[in-house]
Image (spheres, helix red, strand yellow):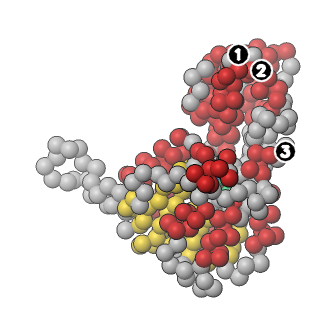
């Protein structure tokens, strides 16, 4: 497994997640099975783990590795389908729900996915290959304003207009079909010292837009809180500020017992507190983990318990 992806904050995730070894758990981002394997090792034969991944290669790899486990069910679904999966498995509530967001090292390195600007690959960026829209289609056919807005909103890239103006000049001459072709064009308008960060932001923005990552995360969090058993825990690992903000705000909202304006003498909102936050500050990887796994450097773990 280590060949494809090294699991991040592994022991911390399991410590926050598992409170009942006979419980029912959900891993929404199976990947190469790092966290799922550890959950399976930790629960007993009465426990159950349901894991899903939207990426077919990750699903097939983990199915061949873990699919024989008696107390595991595997799906090749988006985690936003957690309610459908729980219905299919006749599960009313989970004792723990886990997600390790983003993409795996395998996806980053896979030339077929085009997730990185470091390797020449088709401009694709779909996690789920049944999605129609690819990055090449956005870059070659969306209006200039539309592309700028995507890169500004999902990449928080302040130079989005300048970058996209150059992309639109270049695509008039010939279509832009590879990761390195796009990176070269961006390098013409961004100083060398900012280039790596800018390229990361542009690729992140396209990936988030294509895979609707922020919308599916919101649906997943809403449905997960509904599906947690009392005392059940939700643990989420995030890798950039946009997804972390969504998790932080959802946990905060669900941990409030009242959302009335401060000047109301009595509460009229009927809001119900459903979560208690377990991590006032996010948990970060240790110095040792960071020295062993570069990918862990932007990880943050947030956890909450259903009350
Ligand atoms: C960071 S990796 C998870 C790695 C895994 N925890 C491990 O240790 O092997 C994220 C995985 O989640 C999957 N993924 C991302 N968004 C998803 C979604 N909305 N639904 C299901 N899977 C998703 C990706 O395809 C990728 O395999």
**Is 182 situated left or right of 159 in this image?**
right
Residue at image coords 50%, 63%: 234
Residue 41's spot in the image, x, y percent?
Answer: 65, 76
Specify the quadrant that holds the N terminus. Answer: bottom right
Quick one: which residue is furthest to the left in this view? 265
Disc ID at residue 189: 1
Which element is circle 1 on?
loop
Residue 99's spot in the image, x, y percent?
Answer: 59, 58
- Give the residue number, with chain letter if any, for mark 3: 112
Residue at image coords 59%, 68%: 26
Label 2 or label 3, whichever comes before in sequence order? 3
Mark 2 beta carbon near ligand 1 (under 8 Å): no
- Give the residue number, with chain letter if any, for mark 2: 185
Q: Are marks 2 and 3 in contact (CB under 8 Å)?
A: no
Residues 223 and 207: in front is: 207
Residues 10 and 221: in front is: 10
Residues 95 and 280: in front is: 280
Residues 159 and 55: in front is: 159
């Amino acid at each position: 497994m280590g060949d494809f992806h090294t699991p991040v904050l592994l022991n911390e995730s399991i410590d926050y997640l598992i409170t009942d070894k006979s419980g029912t758990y959900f891993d929404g981002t199976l990947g190469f099975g790092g966290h799922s394997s550890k959950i399976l090792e930790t629960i007993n034969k009465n426990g159950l783990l349901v894991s899903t991944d939207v990426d077919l290669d990750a699903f097939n790899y983990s199915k061949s590795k873990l699919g024989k486990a008696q107390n595991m069910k595997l799906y090749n679904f988006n985690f936003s389908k957690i309610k459908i999966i729980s219905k299919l498995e006749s599960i009313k509530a989970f004792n723990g729900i886990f997600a390790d967001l983003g993409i795996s090292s395998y996806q980053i390195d896979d030339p077929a996915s085009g997730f990185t600007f470091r390797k020449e690959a088709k401009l694709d960026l779909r996690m789920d290959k049944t999605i129609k829209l690819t990055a090449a289609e956005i870059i070659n056919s969306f209006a200039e304003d539309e592309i700028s807005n995507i890169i500004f909103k999902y990449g928080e890239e302040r130079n989005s207009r300048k970058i996209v103006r150059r992309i639109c000049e270049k695509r008039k001459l010939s279509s832009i079909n590879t990761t390195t072709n796009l990176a070269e064009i961006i390098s013409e308008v961004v100083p060398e010292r900012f280039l790596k960060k800018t390229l990361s932001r542009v690729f992140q923005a396209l990936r988030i837009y294509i895979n609707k990552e922020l919308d599916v995360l919101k649906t997943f969090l809403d449905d997960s809180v509904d599906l947690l058993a009392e005392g059940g825990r939700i643990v989420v690992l995030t890798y950039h500020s946009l997804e972390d903000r969504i998790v932080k705000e959802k946990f905060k909202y669900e941990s409030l017992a009242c959302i009335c304006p401060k000047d109301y003498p009595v509460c009229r909102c009927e809001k119900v507190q459903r979560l208690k936050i377990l991590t006032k500050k996010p948990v970060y990887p240790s110095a040792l983990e960071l020295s062993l796994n570069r990918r862990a450097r932007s990880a943050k773990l947030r956890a909450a318990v259903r009350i």
